[in-house]
């Protein structure tokens, strides 16, 4: 039994080694974390933690969440991660298109600065998909800015309903799918667990 296991593992190792050898391009990547499930922002900030742990420079722009308490931000800012946060927060709370558009455009200017900075290794555009779908941010402008970023810079886009143009442009796309969530059973969201 152990000989068969060893042979299987050797074949697997050879396949992985061949894929590693075939990956010869070195550049930053565009990642999208989308879907209706929870965990998109958490996955993005998990990647930010990894990057910080390797001495990389990370910056984040949070659209939608406003001044909502944020454990990831509390930790990552202590490690030099710059955060820019859209002032109005949840657009369904403000219900003011003009104010929300202006707030989006203001924080977008900070995002463009980050996306042009060759010293920033990873930029997180948290919940930016909503800005595109609600027409607060022009898709063509976003695509242009992403295409002009420094070659080594990686970007993570998060949010539900990501536009197909961004999905096609991305190097890696992960879709979070809801299976079960405590909130649906009436359990309150918890600080340190859910946010």
Image: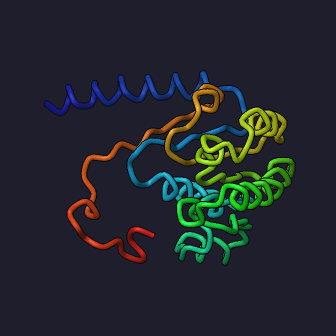
In this view, 126 is above or below 2: below
Residue 92 x %, y % = 53, 60
Residue at horizontal 74 percent and vertical 39 percent from the top: 138
Compared to residue 121, the image places residue 175 above or below, namely above
Residue 46 placed where, x, y %?
A: 52, 58
Name the quadrant of the N terminus: top left
Q: Is residue 112 above or below residue 30?
A: below
User: Which residue is at a point 54% across and 76% down the rendered structure image?
Assistant: 69
Percent across and percent down for residue 22 are: 60, 21
* Residue 105 in the figure: left or right of residue 73: right
- The answer to which image quadrant residue 143 occupies is top right
Closer-to-camera residue (9/139): 139
Residue pictured at 69% horizontal, 66% vertical: 85
Residue 99 pos. (x, y %): 72, 62
Count all numbered tags in the image, as a single digit.
Answer: 0
Q: Residue furthest left?
A: 1
Residue situated in front as seen by the camera: 134 or 20: 134
Residue shown at 40% from the left, 45% from the top: 36
Q: Quadrant of the C terminus?
A: bottom left
Looking at the image, residue 10 sits to the left or right of residue 117; the answer is: left
> Quick check: 11 left or right of 15?
left
Question: Is residue 162 positioned above or below 24 on the image?
Answer: below
């Amino acid at each position: 039994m152990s000989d068969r296991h060893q042979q299987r593992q050797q074949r697997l190792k050879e396949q992985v080694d061949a894929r590693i050898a075939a990956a010869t391009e070195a550049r930053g990547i565009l990642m999208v974390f989308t879907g209706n499930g929870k965990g998109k922002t958490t996955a993005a900030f998990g990647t930010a933690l990894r990057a910080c742990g390797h001495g990389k420079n990370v910056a984040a722009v949070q659209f939608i969440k406003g001044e909502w308490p944020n454990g990831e931000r509390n930790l990552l800012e202590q490690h030099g991660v710059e955060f820019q946060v859209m002032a109005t927060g949840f657009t369904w709370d403000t219900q003011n298109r003009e104010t929300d558009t202006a707030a989006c455009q203001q924080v977008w200017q900070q995002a463009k600065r980050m996306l042009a900075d060759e010293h920033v290794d990873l930029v997180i555009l948290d919940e930016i998909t909503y800005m595109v779908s609600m027409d607060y941010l022009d898709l063509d402008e976003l695509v242009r800015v992403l295409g002009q970023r420094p070659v080594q810079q990686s970007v993570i886009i998060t949010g539900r309903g990501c536009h197909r143009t961004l999905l096609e442009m991305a190097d890696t796309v992960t879709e979070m799918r809801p299976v079960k969530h405590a909130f649906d059973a009436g359990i309150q969201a918890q600080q340190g667990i859910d946010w």
